[in-house]
Image: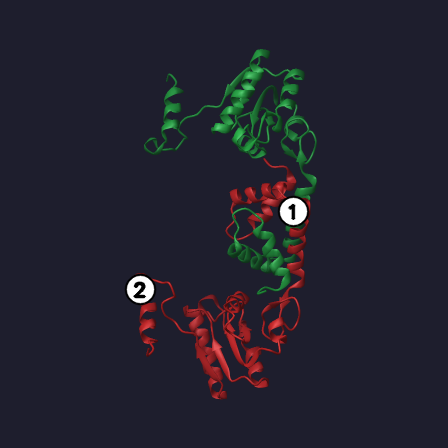
Chain colours: A green, B red
Amino acid sequence: MHYPEPISKLIDSFMKLPGIGPKTAARLAFFVLSMKEDTVLDFAKALVEAKRNLSYCSICGHITDVDPCHICQDKQRDDTIICVVQTPKDVIALEKMRDYHGLYHVLHGAISPMDGIGPEDINVSPLLKRLQNERVQELILATNPTIEGEATAMYISRLVKPSGIRTTRIAHGLPVGGDLEYADEVTLSKALEGRREL
Amino acid sequence: MHYPEPISKLIDSFMKLPGIGPKTAARLAFFVLSMKEDTVLDFAKALVEAKRNLSYCSICGHITDVDPCHICQDKQRDDTIICVVQTPKDVIALEKMRDYHGLYHVLHGAISPMDGIGPEDINVSPLLKRLQNERVQELILATNPTIEGEATAMYISRLVKPSGIRTTRIAHGLPVGGDLEYADEVTLSKALEGRREL
């Protein structure tokens, strides 16, 4: 053992985080020693409270410290549109945009037969129940543009279409600021396919 | 505010660490939510305990959870040699080598007139006291091969020489596995200067 025990325990804890190897973990641990005690206590408290006080919204499945979450509770939001996403991080990315004022539904995953994840393993049936009870007119399928995300969007769209609710899929194409030269064939083909009159 | 408060507090804490920006902090915070509660509690405990239980050894200045530190307490070690380094991390790097069995002295910095750091701002005078009291025969100056490190080594060497204690400086040259072609001129010149008979 090269490190005193308290610091080697801290290094071990940092190493459990993604993308942090032994060298970075040691650097972070030594940095913690140089921080003010109050800041370290706040950090420890933030860790425990984030883990203990956060849960998933019983309506939309987004991560939240109150149930239902702030978005589901917000009377200002348009409850005729639900945007379906794979993870809580996607909700946050969409919220940062500040352009969307509807509700969300978080699937917590996507259908992936290769990994043994079927429709019953993701948060789909609560979505269908919401569609029955609420006055939803449009379902925006904003799952990732991957094989799994596409399959999930397709699956949900087929389930929902008979009920007469409009189902839409977010657009695929060149990212803004992207370079046509470096775009892959599939993206380019989607961009052409989705062209619009100017 | 896009994130629920407990998670945004955790993200803020992660962002105080070096090299961790808002995106990485968010990724780490979401990862913490997916960890087992016990693991998160251990992490929080490790943070607090590392900060509270670690201090500097009253003899050598190395970071430790007992005073004097394990190295100073170890009767097996050769107390006729002291290796002088800038930081506790340097002690750990040297200990990993497993070749050195003497004692250490951590300066906690180097003389740097540009930054207003003089000899009185680093851990030098306790070193001089150790040299008077202990039966030290050799002082290895293992400060970094930078301007500050060199100046510090030179300063200590001048102070100590009159007492008859042997002062040595670690070798400069090409790192093992390094490439002559890519070595800088100063390193090459030091490598030539320090050449030895085979």
| Residue A180 image label | none
Name the side, left or right, on which B73 lies relative to B84.
right
* Mark-to-mark CA distance, 1 and 2: 48 Å
Q: Where is residue B90 in the image (x, y as percent from the top left)?
A: 51, 67
For this rendering, which residue is in front, A143 or A115? A115
Residue bearing the label numbered 2: B180
Residue B82, position in %: x, y?
53, 78
Could one spot residue A121 in this view of the protein? yes
The residue carrying mark 1 is: A47
Assess disc 2: are there few (<14), some (14-19) or many (≥20) residues with their C-alpha within 10 Å of its C-alpha. Answer: few
- Give the residue type that dot 1 points to: Leu
Residue A38 at least partly seen: no
Q: Are marks 1 and 2 in contact (CB under 8 Å)?
A: no
Q: Residues within 10 Å of mark 1 (few under 14, many from 20)?
A: many
Horizontal and vertical percent position of residue A133 = 67, 16
Disc 1 secondary structure class: helix
Asked which quadrant contains residue A7, the reply is bottom right
Give the quadrant of the C terminus of chain B: bottom left
In the rendered image, which quarter contains the N terminus of chain B? top right
Chain at tag 1: A
Q: In terms of image quadrants, where is residue B127?
A: bottom right
